[in-house]
């Protein structure tokens, strides 16, 4: 797998222990020759390497394109079947309800645009599968750890309350990817935590156990725009028998290890 030092990469080791894990230091996916050499002999590649810093992508869209689109194209060209990790940010979030896999895309920013181009490169070859997920937390920098750190530092928690989605534990998406790795499904499938969607402020309150100050995206003022509705339909995943977990249960288990 690519991007093996990231949250999903680290979690996948528990589910596919025999696979080869290539971190950023071991394989830079923007290096087409290195990708061909490293992945040329593989039957299946889980491609999780990505520039995931959404605001960083907005500030350096050329780099985002090179890693998230160019990297995916290089991986797809290596010839193995690819399971490609992608994101709710390919959607604008302007539509109500849950986004199905075939809903029209319309990324708002550089991260989503570059990830969508990556999807297209991967889906341009037969046999490949795109797994879109959302709001991932695991072993790495993530929202839950930021909230816990702010709480420990005694800072007032002002949290965005106008973006809705479903948090996803890296271990849950890794388990789903391992399940899909043993099958031949193609196209796009959404895999997130299950259960009622929430806002970032709702999630923060689950994490700290007390009310937080709810603010708008404008008040927060991040450089990159974010979709207001990030809720992905899990209907196809359920139909395929993909194991899913209620996000509230997974957050609870994660917090037991973080405290
Ligand atoms: N995190 C989320 O909330 C989220 C939500 C939806 C979808 N996704 C998708 O899920 C996948 C995995 O995300 P994650 O949460 O595991 O992200 P992550 O923790 O940021 O891991 C991504 C990994 O990719 C590596 N990487 C960056 N540029 C690379 C390059 N040029 N060549 C090789 N590796 C490179 C990073 O290494 P460095 O740290 O050294 O740069 C990092 O180890 C990504 O495709 C992401 O787009 C994530």
Image: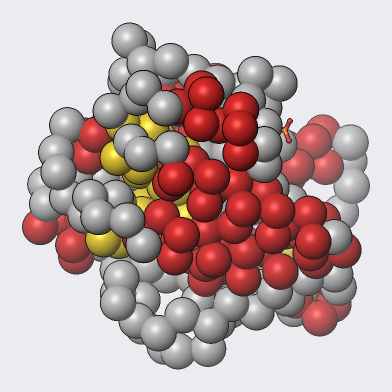
What sort of colour scheme is used for the picture?
secondary structure
Residue 257 seen in render: yes
| Of residues 231 and 119, the one drawn nearer to the viewer in this rendering | 119
Question: Where's the N terminus, which quadrant?
Answer: top left
Which quadrant of the figure shows ligand 1? Answer: top right
Q: Say left or right for 133 vs 67.
A: left
The spot of residue 76 in percent (x, y) is 43, 46
Q: Say left or right for 221 vs 189.
A: right
Which residue does the image show at 33% across and 36% down from the upper left?
A: 80
| Of residues 43 and 105, the one drawn nearer to the viewer in this rendering | 43
Question: Where's the C terminus, which quadrant?
Answer: top right
| Of residues 151 and 99, the one drawn nearer to the viewer in this rendering | 99
The spot of residue 23 in percent (x, y) is 61, 22
Q: Hey, which quadrant is residue 81 in on the image?
A: top left
The spot of residue 144 in percent (x, y) is 64, 42
Which residue does the image show at 25% across and 45% down from the upper left?
A: 244
| Residue farthest bottom in this picture | 95
Residue 138 seen in render: no
Which residue does the image show at 61% across and 32% down from the upper left?
A: 33
- Please determine whether, in this image, residue 116 is positioned above or below residue 162: above
Q: Hey, which quadrant is residue 45 in on the image?
A: top left
- Please determine whether, in this image, residue 87 is positioned above or below residue 243: below
- Please determine whether, in this image, residue 136 is positioned above or below residue 255: below
Which residue does the image show at 62% across and 71% down from the upper left?
A: 113
Report how many numbered discs are placed on residues in the image: 0
């Amino acid at each position: 797998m690519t991007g093996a030092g990231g949250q999903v990469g680290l979690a996948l080791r528990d589910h596919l222990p025999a696979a080869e894990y290539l971190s950023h230091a071991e394989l830079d996916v923007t290096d087409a020759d290195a990708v061909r050499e490293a992945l040329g002999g593989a039957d299946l590649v889980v491609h999780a390497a990505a520039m995931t810093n959404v605001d960083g992508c907005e500030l350096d869209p050329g780099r985002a394109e090179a890693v998230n689109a160019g990297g995916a194209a290089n991986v797809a060209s290596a010839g193995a079947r690819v399971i490609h990790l992608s994101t709710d940010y390919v959607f604008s979030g302007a539509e109500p309800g849950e986004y199905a896999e075939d809903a029209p895309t319309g990324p708002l920013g550089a991260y989503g645009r570059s990830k969508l181009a990556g999807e297209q490169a991967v889906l341009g070859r037969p046999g490949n599968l795109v797994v879109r997920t959302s709001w991932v937390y695991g072993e790495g920098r993530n929202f839950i750890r930021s909230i816990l750190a702010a709480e420990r530092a005694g800072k007032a928690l002002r949290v965005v309350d106008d973006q809705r989605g479903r948090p996803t534990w890296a271990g849950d998406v890794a388990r789903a990817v391992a399940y899909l790795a043993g099958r031949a499904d193609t196209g796009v499938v959404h895999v997130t935590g299950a259960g009622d969607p929430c806002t970032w402020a709702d999630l923060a309150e689950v994490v700290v156990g007390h009310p937080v100050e709810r603010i708008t995206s404008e008040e927060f003022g991040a450089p990159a725009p974010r979709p207001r509705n990030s809720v992905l339909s899990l209907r196809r995943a359920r139909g395929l028998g993909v194991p899913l977990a209620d996000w509230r249960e997974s957050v609870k288990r994660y917090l037991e290890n973080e405290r």
